[in-house]
Amino acid sequence: MTCTHTEQAEYSLVTLWQETGQAHFLHALTTQEILTALEKRRDLAEHLLAQINREAVHSQHADEASLIMLDHSQTLLSAELTWLDRTIRTLSARVHEK
Amino acid sequence: MWQIICLCLPAVTMSERQRFFALFSNVLRANGREPGTMDLGLFFLHMLSPEEALTVLEERLDLVVRSQNLMEQPVELASAQDVIQAAINDHIQTLLEAEHAWLKRTIARLQNTNLNRYQEQTEPLLPLADMKNYSQTNG
């Protein structure tokens, strides 16, 4: 019973990540369109992160759950920005190579 | 994490996305929270006790670790399409790594909160050194 449950959870997880990869927005675009989309996305992520950082300064005395959620948003957005910068660099280099 | 990855799909139109966020905002407001960039799977965290939150986050960490193991397969770069596939895998892996780091940090934080609460509840009336002196004096 437990084994079946674990197998089902594993299968759902595999399916989730396969579908996420297959449906990712980058698949639908050409390299030039990807660069434009990523740069727009970087502007949005930078704007959101700045907003969240400002919120963090004013939330020193907020309840613990709010601080945890704020930390989550900051962590994920910083990671998103890191990926965007890395991917823009890689794809730009490839476009210039051609 | 899930909004960033899952709600920017080409198959989801802008109006569908707006509709989804409007419904999500209504649910948050009904629960006394303001919508922001809050993760769907975590918005209920403030309703849980530290012990319950710890259980939820440990389960989530388990899912993240299993997902990281699934995503670890290397991709050989031969064509432009492979570079895009590598970027997509890198995107998911980068967000999973960030989620992993946040979960570890938050679990440690909640464990610490629980420990402090436990110590406050079971704090002896006299500090340990005073208790030793007391027992030596009083036999």
Image (cartoon, rainbow, N blue to C red):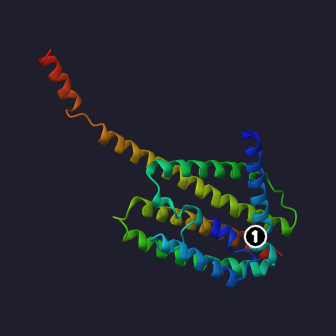
Extreme-right residue of the structure: B78
Relative horizontal placement of residue B122, taking residue B71 as reference (left or right): left
Q: Looking at the image, which residue is at 54% across and 61% down? A: B42
Extreme-top residue of the structure: B139
Q: Looking at the image, which residue is at 72% across and 82% down? A: B13
Q: Looking at the image, which residue is at 64% across and 70% down? A: B4
Q: Which residue is mark 1?
A: A24
Where, by quadrant of the figure, is residue B40 drawn?
A: bottom right
Q: Amino acid at mark 1?
A: His
Where, by quadrant of the figure, is residue B2 drawn?
A: bottom right
Where the N terminus of chain A falls, by quadrant?
top right
Where, by quadrant of the figure, is residue A22 drawn?
A: bottom right
Where the C terminus of chain A falls, by quadrant?
bottom right
Extreme-left residue of the structure: B137
Percent coordinates x, y for residue A2 in the rendering: 72, 40
Number of numbered discs: 1
Relative horizontal placement of residue A36, taking residue B57 as reference (left or right): right
Percent coordinates x, y for residue B113 in the rendering: 39, 48
Chain ID for label 1?
Answer: A
